[in-house]
Amino acid sequence: MIIAKNNDRRAGSGRRAAKASMPAVLAITAWLAGPAAGIAANCPGNPDALGTSRIIAVDPTEHPRIGTMQYGETLPLQDHEVVLTFDDGPLPKHTNAILDTLAAECVKATFFMVGRMAHDFPQDVRRVRDAGHTIGTHSQNHPFRFGSLPAERMTAEIEEAIANVGTALGNPSAVAPFFRIPGLRRAEAVEAYLASRGIMTWSADFPADDWRPISAAQVASLALSRLEAKGKGILLLHDIQARTQTALPVILQQLKARGYRIVHVVPASAAHPKTLTEPSEWIPLWIHGAPVMAHGPATPPFAFGKPGNPVHTGPSAALSVWLARSRKPAPAALHTAGNDPERTPVLTHRPKRAARGPAAQPGSTPAPAAGTTGPRPGPIRTGHRMDTPKTRIR
């Protein structure tokens, strides 16, 4: 009888302890699930959305240069966290489709805009802002040898881009103090000037090579394999490319399937107090060991192919970029067997050199305004620091 009573007493105390600890367990479970679960559940029309797991608010003066493709620090991400970034826009045909894809998954990203593009398409700059994304800058004209520019021109490229994006937004303070150097062609003078202005220089942790003439499926495969090799990081994409527009839904679907989480980065402010971190969190483990980026095919020197028919008639859109090809991009698909970029078909020949200017297209080049002198800026050229420039800096 005494044993039975003691057993009942212990069982009762165990039930009370379990009941008392239940709120704590639920709280821990909710914390582990993170905000992404709530965001995904509230994503209109898509309860299974990838979502955005959390916001990191950074102080550019404390960490002026990030991205392990070039620097010794990157964002303080946890394992399986990804930051999406897009360069060179806005270009309505592709940027708006990319915005639709991100919105469908309730994913937030950072856009590094070219000043000329913001000037030509201000309504699309505002659409990026209204969708809740972060907007940084990427120079005024995307000069190919940015790190070799004279100091006065380099300064003008930075300041004019900030001014044009700020004007498009109707509020200069809405431009984030984030800058990505065109082509990642860094120079100490550039970085020093940006740091003096309190602007964070962004490189990346891995690209998807979407500026190269490869398929959308290869873009998705390279993005995912390089992410898997590092486990987290900043992904570099371009929102002016048709192949990126086509690859993005596949990338997001695979991120969800593989358990990755999206992180949104904003500058620290009253609305977003600085995220507290330890210095060691900004230095990923791969900095101390051998490079772990997945080895894909050798990247050929970047060159544009034959331009398609321009589809926009903005004042400098025809010369801003090689616009979308008239054909529809083929849907992207990943190879399910052996997700290995080395095993997928790749471009093995060197692309033909493009002409120094866009090929003449009937009605594609706007006539110079009366009274103006000097040539118009050439087309924006994208690529990365290993590409061979095709233009001479004047």
Image (cartoon, rainbow, N blue to C red):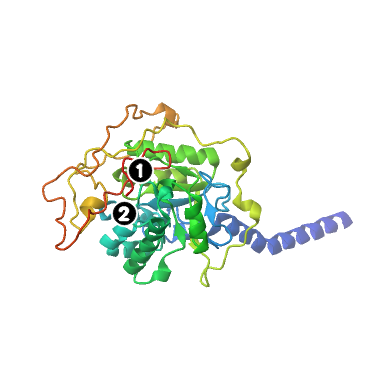
Instruction: Look at the image and tell me whether residue 226 can be seen.
Output: yes
The residue under the point 40% across, 33% down is 299
Answer with left or right where residue 327 lies relative to residue 111: left
> Which image quadrant for residue 250?
top left
**Pointer 1: residues within 10 angstroms few (<14), some, or many (20+)?**
many
Q: Secondary structure at mark 1?
A: helix
From the viewer's perspective, is residue 74 above or below residue 127? above
> Which image quadrant for residue 357?
top left
Q: Position of residue 336 (x, y in %)?
A: 41, 32
Q: Position of residue 275 (x, y in %)?
A: 58, 62
Along the viewing direction, whichever of 90 and 215 lies nearer the viewer: 90
Q: What residue did someone put label 2 on?
A: 95
Query: What amino acid is labelled 2 in the image?
Result: Thr
Q: Secondary structure at mark 2?
A: helix
Q: What residue did someone put label 1 on?
A: 247
N-terminal label among 1 and 2: 2
Along the viewing direction, whichever of 4 and 140 lies nearer the viewer: 140
Q: Can you tell which mark lies on residue 315? A: none
From the viewer's perspective, is residue 161 above or below residue 143? below
Query: What amino acid is labelled 1 in the image?
Result: Ala
The residue under the point 53% across, 53% down is 65
* Cα–Cα span, label 1 and label 2: 13 Å
